[in-house]
Structure formats: structure tokens, C-alpha cells
Amino acid sequence: MKKTPLQTDDRRSTRRGIFSLELALTLPILGVVLLGLFEFSLLFFARGSVVEASRVAARTASLPGVGPEAVERSVRNVLSSRLRRGMKIRMNLGEQTGDVVVVGIRVPMRMAAPDLLWPIGVGLAGRDLYSETRMIKE
């Protein structure tokens, strides 16, 4: 039995409708994944900066005769201006040679990345990037 042109057109329009429905269902999922990947990569990069800043600050603090101002200055030299705005530094500089020097740096995640995933319940509010480094005072 031969198909009429009318029957062939109906099948094509049905296929177009299915394609549009598939696109409408998968596009939001793809968008959320891409936004999450972008936000995660910014946070990952910022975490590396915070770890490096705590390492440099602890190395500075382990030197003899160094005060809290010099440690904070070394942290500011490593961190970007955006991360510097919300940072908090906790330090224990030790008194004598052989004491443990501790430097901890806390930066709010909202300073490191835009909060893109809050509509789906994965917000950055109240979360911090934290790094602590311990060294022996020289």
C-alpha cells in the first residue's frame, strides 16, 4: 500500500515535536551542569590561592623576629583583591626557636565565586575556604 503525502507530513511534524520536547527537558539539566562546573573551577582555583597564602604566611612566621604585620602582608601579597576583602587570619607565632607556628586563613566562598546554584539549593552562603599550615620556628 502506498503512503500519501499527507501521511508522510504527519510523521515529520510528530518527530519535530518529540525533538523539541527532548531539547526542553535536557537543556536545563545541561545548563545546571555547566554552571556547576564553572563555579567549581573558580572555587578550586581560589582554594589553591588560599593554600598557597597560608604556606607563604607560615614560612614568613617561622623566621626569627617577624611580627603579625609581616605575616598579614605576606598573605595580602599572595591573595587576589577579591579574596582579600573577606579574609580572616588566625596565627600563633610562637615565642622561641623550635615552637610550632600556626597560620590559618579563612575566606568566604562567596568572595571566590558567584553563587550560581542557589536556586537548586546548593548555595555558598555561610561556607568558607580554609587552610591552615604549621611549621617549626627557626
Image (cartoon, rainbow, N blue to C red):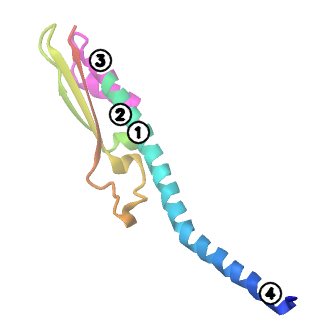
* Residue 85 among those drawn in magenta: no
Q: Amino acid at mark 3?
A: Thr
Query: Earlier along the polypeptide chain: callout 1 or callout 3?
Result: 1
Residue identifier under label 1: 46
Determine the residue positioned at 33% across, 54% down.
Answer: 124
Query: Earlier along the polypeptide chain: callout 3 or callout 4?
Result: 4
Residue identifier under label 2: 50
* Residue in the foreground of this view, choosing between 17 and 136: 17
Q: x, y (%) of residue 102?
A: 20, 23
* Residue in the foreground of this view, choosing between 15 and 129: 15
Q: x, y (%) of residue 92?
A: 16, 24
Quarter location, residue 10: bottom right
Q: Nearer the viewer, mark 2 or mark 4?
A: 4
Instruction: Tell me: 132 left or right of 79.
Output: left
Q: Amino acid at mark 1?
A: Ala
Region rendered in magenta: 56-81
Q: Please identify the residue farthest to the left as the structure is shown.
A: 95
Judging from the image, what secondary structure is the residue with disc 1 in?
A: helix
